[in-house]
Image: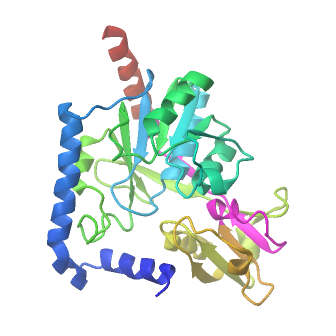
Amino acid sequence: MNSAAWSAWIERQWYSPASPIRYLAPLSWLYAFAASFRRGLYSSGLLKSDGPDCPVVVVGNLSVGGTGKTPLVIWLAEFLARHGWKPGIVSRGYGGRKVAWPRQVRPDSDPREVGDEALLISRRTGCPMAVDPDRVRAARSLREQARCDIILSDDGLQHYALKRDIEIVVVDSTRLFGNGYCLPVGPLREKSSRLKQVDLVVYNGSPGPAGFEMNLIGDVAVNNRSAELKVPLAEFSSSRCHALAGIGNPGRFFDHLKARGLRVDSHSFPDHHAFIAADLCFGDDAPVLMTEKDAVKCAGFSQPNHWHVPVAARLERGFEIRLLQLLEDNLNEQKTA
């Protein structure tokens, strides 16, 4: 069984309440206890959280796989910039191979060094960004070198070494928390009760309890070879297309295309897959549609029939108001401290 097939099989077990994998529940309980115990060490001060002398906003999730964190981070960076902040963004840089940390990310960075998601965020926002397994070090570098006055952490909800002022959790409103178990029996990194302790909960796709709705908008395809060539997705509905995705939840991308009337042959790859030219060859000249995150890794061998579909997050007004209020409260606390 190859890695893609194995990943797909595991995911099916996680999101099937009747899966026999549930009989391994004691492993999940041990994982949940360890995660809770570790968080308690930081909460009690026995382990120290640290970071820059500016507000830190962590965007993460409870489950493994794609929930929509990256589009939300992009939205937050653009929103904060419009409101007078100078945001910097830190990330683990998953998939990047760099021995010297932290690594500054620029629009022309090599995705093999900084990771696909980091490069995508840098290109979309233009904000100072650094990747480093040590997010504290990355955040401090942005504060000192780029003079950022607020730090956004892409993922890192469980990276408690980084102090945070606001925690935002993104939930996939379709898959939610799967079978409800923590790893390795289920998809959760922490118990779902953790939602009660965060500042903001965002549901990607439809409204959820005690949270805000986010929708991903993307109705245009951009040619991989010629970025100025853009066409409505509807133009691909007259014939079959190939759709590929190497993201945490490939099904979301495929459903996005089908909902717009496209007939697609779906090709799933593991998250952060290192694409090669052969991965995009299907024996015909049909259009190949992919996510924007995947496209940054295919630039060197993309053909004229290769396209990507950028998406943008849309948040309800209530989320904007609540976020600004939390930031104002944080600044007031700092003034009186």
Outermost residue toward the bottom in this view? 283
* Residue 289 painted magenta: no
Residue 25, percent across and down?
17, 72
For the point 83% across and 64% down, the residue is 225
Q: What is the span of residues highlighted in magenta in the rendered image?
A: 291-320
Decide: is 318 above or below 227. Answer: above
Q: Is residue 225 visible?
A: yes
Q: Quadrant of residue 328?
A: top left
Residue 63, percent across and down?
35, 60
| Residue 224 relative to residue 44: left or right | right
State how many labels appear.
0
Q: Is residue 18 visible?
A: no
Outermost residue toward the front in this view? 99
Task: Give the camera-side residue of 301 and 86.
Answer: 301
In the rendered image, the quadrant that contains the C terminus is: top left
For the point 77% across and 83% down, the residue is 286
Residue 293, percent across and down?
62, 60
| Residue 52 relative to residue 82: left or right | left
